[in-house]
Image: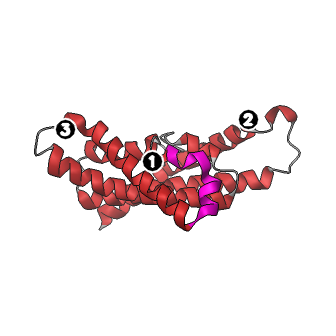
Amino acid sequence: MKELLLIAIGSALVNNVVLSQFLGLCPFLGVSKKVETSAGMGAAVIFVITIASAVTNLVYTGILVTLKLEYLQTIVFILVIAALVQFVEMFLKKSMPSLYEALGVYLPLITTNCAVLGVALTNVQKAYGFVQSVVNGIGISVGFTIAIIMLAGVREKIQYNDIPHSFQGSPIVLITSGLMAIAFFGFSGLI
């Protein structure tokens, strides 16, 4: 139990996928204009990464290792992730059309979000079992959600501030993201 808690906290805060590993920056920067949209993207990422962690672990240990086809892991993981994202996209389009429209092009981009693939590959690299893989997936996706909602909150607050013209738009977002990354670096402690 202690090991699972350490994996979850480490994945969410210490090794935050966006602010420490710099994976998944496209939806992080693109969707973080409003907190509501960011929360929706975070929920979609939590679902996809958690289910992808479970399914890719089962596929890897049950099929690829058994058949000695470990070298196909990246291709197989991408196919699993793409199928899960299609499922999320169909679900949101049917049940939450406003969120589906707000996420726009960024929802299908979860398929190519390197954070999702990175979790699956990290689980294999660290030789995590099924439960450890799922906990790692939950931790990483919650860390992504924390980061994107925090950035969205800051962006909403500074939207109407008097920012010099040369810093308006993307520059201030990148500066804010960099400052957040420095703050999250504090979770790793001094080495």
Can residue 67 be spotted in the picture?
yes
Q: Measuring from the top left, give residue 186's x and y in whole percent.
A: 54, 48
Q: Quadrant of the N terminus?
A: bottom left
Which residue occupies 79% across, 50% down?
158
Under circle 1, the secondary element is: loop
Which residue occupies 73% across, 51% down?
155
Question: What is the span of residues highlighted in magenta in the rendered image?
Answer: 96-109
Q: Is residue 150 above or below residue 68?
A: below
Amino acid type of disc 3? Glu
Whether residue 54 sits left or right of residue 166 in the image: it is: left
Circle on res. 171: 2
Q: Report which residue position mark 3 lands on.
A: 70
Which residue occupies 35% across, 42% down?
78
Q: Gap between marks 2 and 1, in whole Å?
A: 25 Å
Q: Quadrant of residue 95?
A: bottom right
| Circles 2, 3 touching at the beta carbon (< 8 Å) | no
Under circle 2, the secondary element is: helix
Whether residue 31 sits left or right of residue 57 in the image: it is: right
Q: Measuring from the top left, give residue 172's x and y in whole percent.
A: 74, 39
Q: Report which residue position mark 1 lands on.
A: 15
Q: Which of the two discs, 2 and 3, labels the residue nearer the N terminus?
A: 3
Amino acid type of disc 2? Pro
Under circle 3, the secondary element is: helix
Please tell me how crowded label 1 is: few (under 14), some (14-19), or many (20+) other residues with Cα within 10 Å. Answer: many
Of discs 3 and 1, which sits in the foreground? Answer: 3
Circle on res. 154: none
Residue 111, magenta (yes or no): no
Can residue 11 be spotted in the picture?
no
The main secondary structure of the magenta stretch is: helix
Which residue occupies 57% across, 40% down?
26
Please tell me how crowded label 3 is: few (under 14), some (14-19), or many (20+) other residues with Cα within 10 Å. Answer: some
